[in-house]
Amino acid sequence: IAIGAGSRHERINERGAAHLLGHLCFKGIAGAESSAALAQAMEGIGANSNAGTDRESTLFWIHAPRAVATEAARLIGAVALAPLLLPEHLKIEREIVIEEIRSYADDPSEQASTALDSALFGDHAFGREIAGTIPGIRKLQHGRVRAFHAREYRPKATALAIAGDLSAAEANAIARAALAAAPRSSVQRAASPSRRAVKPRGRGEDGIVAKVRDGEQAQFSVGLPALRREDPDAPALEMLATILGDGSASRLFLEVREERGLVYDIGASAIDYRDAGALVISGGADPGRVTEALQLVTEALRRLAREAPSAAEIERARAYLAGRLERAADDPRGLAEWHASQRVLRRVPQELGELLAEIERVHPADLLRVARNLVRGGSLRVGLSAPRSTLAAVRRAVRRGDLDPSAVRPPARRSARL
């Protein structure tokens, strides 16, 4: 069950409510009034379930044997659409969410990722931690959480997807069970600025946001503003991200890890929202070599804008993306999540075959055009979890223009050894 409600849709006095709801909904439903009773009801039929909150949606899922699918659907439907949401549940779950936020704060890669979100999107919801802040969660009132659920978890914002070896009659029975708890009338939703088209503005000195932390490894996450979810060039951007840093045959993995030994791992991905997006590259390196790694990332971006990828690279990217999509289609849970998310996140939902066809239609000229548009924005936005000396070195590199992929520079030459 996908709900078109996430942290983006919170009002100022509701920040953290979307994520907290993903916890609270599992605290009890009619007939299973505690988290223990609900867990016993689910596990007693051999099912497992969970929820995940993003910035524009929340997803509830349950994976169960076919013979008990209708009962499993009834349970997850009640969890998402008719939870008890009692004050005593909030008192307990508030502390659990606070511990979760603390775990993020102790994870250097999470720190770097959150810092980049802020560097890219500033005070917009996209730039804030989805789970909220500890002070904000402590102040969050029970009535605000209930109001968020009543306002945002509406039938029109809900999509149900079922995947498995089922007949149409079985699927219909499962759907009726899942939606039985849905409210018969929806609360009128007031217009919210969070649902209007927004052009977020980043923050940070020189486009850098950092969590200063001593240690033997620094984490970095860098990016450039990119395309919204339904931009016609989104498939080309996905292919560029794959060529650049998705997989062990990608350019950055081979150049920065395999050839230079600068990082244990490095990856690139495209993130997208209804009206904004970004290309993100993340990794970790010795604090003294972060700047070198980021210069290689910058040069890789310049190269993407200078010349189209080779035919072999394009075919690898197509095969890699197609394989990932087809593997997801073989997993009932992944397939259901795909279809449900499509229907709450896109104005025109796609089928897997349509996305595969879009990837096939991307030409080298499309990749070159998208790459050139991408790097025109200037210097990389940078998120760091690193010592103060690393932060100072990265700032110097930004001021010199070393992390500006839009700068036209010839490829660096390697000197021959005598």
Image (spheres, rainbow, N blue to C red):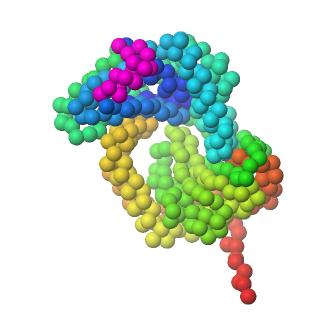
Residue 8: name its quadrant: top right
Residue 53 visible, this orientation: yes
Q: Quick check: 86 left or right of 214?
A: left
Residue 409 against residue 182 in the figure, above or below:
below
Q: Residue 162 location, x and y as percent?
A: 30, 35
Prevailing secondary structure class for the magenta stretch in the rendered image: helix
Q: What stretch of residues is rendered in magenta? A: 31-45
Q: Residue 112 location, x and y as percent?
A: 66, 45
Which is nearer the eye, 387 or 244? 387
Residue 359: name its quadrant: bottom left
Residue 404: name its quadrant: bottom right
Q: Residue 246 location, x and y as percent?
A: 51, 57
Residue 383 against residue 251 in the figure, above or below:
above
Q: Residue 265 location, x and y as percent?
A: 59, 57
Q: Residue at x 70, y 78 (%)?
A: 414
User: From the image, which quarter does the N terminus lie in?
Assistant: top left
- Magenta-colored stretch includes residue 39: yes
Which is nearer the eye, 298 or 291? 291
Residue 363 visible, this orientation: no
Q: Residue at x 74, y 49 (%)?
A: 215
Q: Quick check: 178 left or right of 394?
A: left
- Magenta-colored stretch includes residue 37: yes
Q: Residue at x 34, y 35 (%)?
A: 63
Q: Quick check: 176 left or right of 86?
A: left
